[in-house]
Image: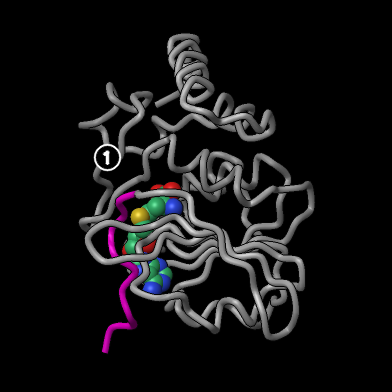
Amino acid sequence: MQDSFKHQGLRNKLVSDLKMKGIKDNSVLEAIKNVPRHLFMDSGFLDHAYQDKAFPISSGQTISQPFTVAFQTELLNVKKDHKILEIGTGSGYQAAILCYMGARVYTIERIKELFRKTSVFLPSINYRPKKMIYGDGYRGYIDESPYDSIIVTAGALEIPQSLISQLKIGGRMVIPVGDQVQQMKLLIKISESDYESHNFGDFQFVPMLKEKN
Ligand code: SAH
């Protein structure tokens, strides 16, 4: 499967939809315009790749809706060379968007099959996270901390303190928190012991699960 003019046209349309829905950061829109989302989807859903919808990937997980990816990425305030930790690699689409924006990306996935598949797939289409990690995102990845920002792409029941401790002072964490429906939260770490919290409305994610025993 290749990228084609047809796909590029569909992405341009998606970008104008996202602008209408309120996404403003040009570097985010530019990434959505360039990363071929259809390559991240199972063949049965290819025709729908540029609709603003979430779709199933393997292992009962989903590739987030483009609006959600754009919204979370905008809240991260990504700058070139930022060191970013992602929890929930999934299809790798969000990681590819961050790589496209020039970030140094570390991404963790707890389902081995998805981890394996995406670890091979992303470099094969020239997106190269600094490291893809198989493990429990609740623990973060202390070896490379502190991070400029952390993005959680699964719904957490509470805010994991271990992740906040791995942020730089001034660093940002974007995390959906809640059970059936999640509140999108932006946390900004203001000192070693304190952070600001801002709410950005309701979203729906697959659950962030604790480590398998
Ligand atoms: N960012 C992904 C979205 C995938 S859906 C994309 O762009 O496609 C959320 C992912 O989070 C799933 O793959 C799920 O397995 C993973 N996940 C859930 N709980 C986790 C945890 N504790 N640690 C790491 N990954 C987790």
Which residue shows up at 64% across the image and 58% down it?
A: 105
Q: Secondary structure at mark 1?
A: strand
Figure quadrant of the N terminus: top left
The magenta span reads 203-213
Figure quadrant of the C terminus: bottom left
Left or right of residue 103, residue 108 in this image: left
Residue 150 visible at all: no
Q: Position of residue 47 (x, y in %)?
A: 27, 21
Check the image and report above or below for 71 versus 145: above
> Which residue matches tag 1?
55
Check the image and report above or below for 162 versus 54: below
- Split into quadrants, the picture shows ligand 1 in the one at bottom left
Which residue shows up at 56% across the image and 77% down it?
A: 163
Residue situated furthest bottom in the rendering: 213
> Can residue 204 be found in the magenta stretch?
yes
Q: Main secondary structure of the magenta part?
A: loop
Residue 197 visible at all: yes
> Can residue 43 be found in the magenta stretch?
no
Which residue shows up at 24% across the image and 31% down it?
A: 45
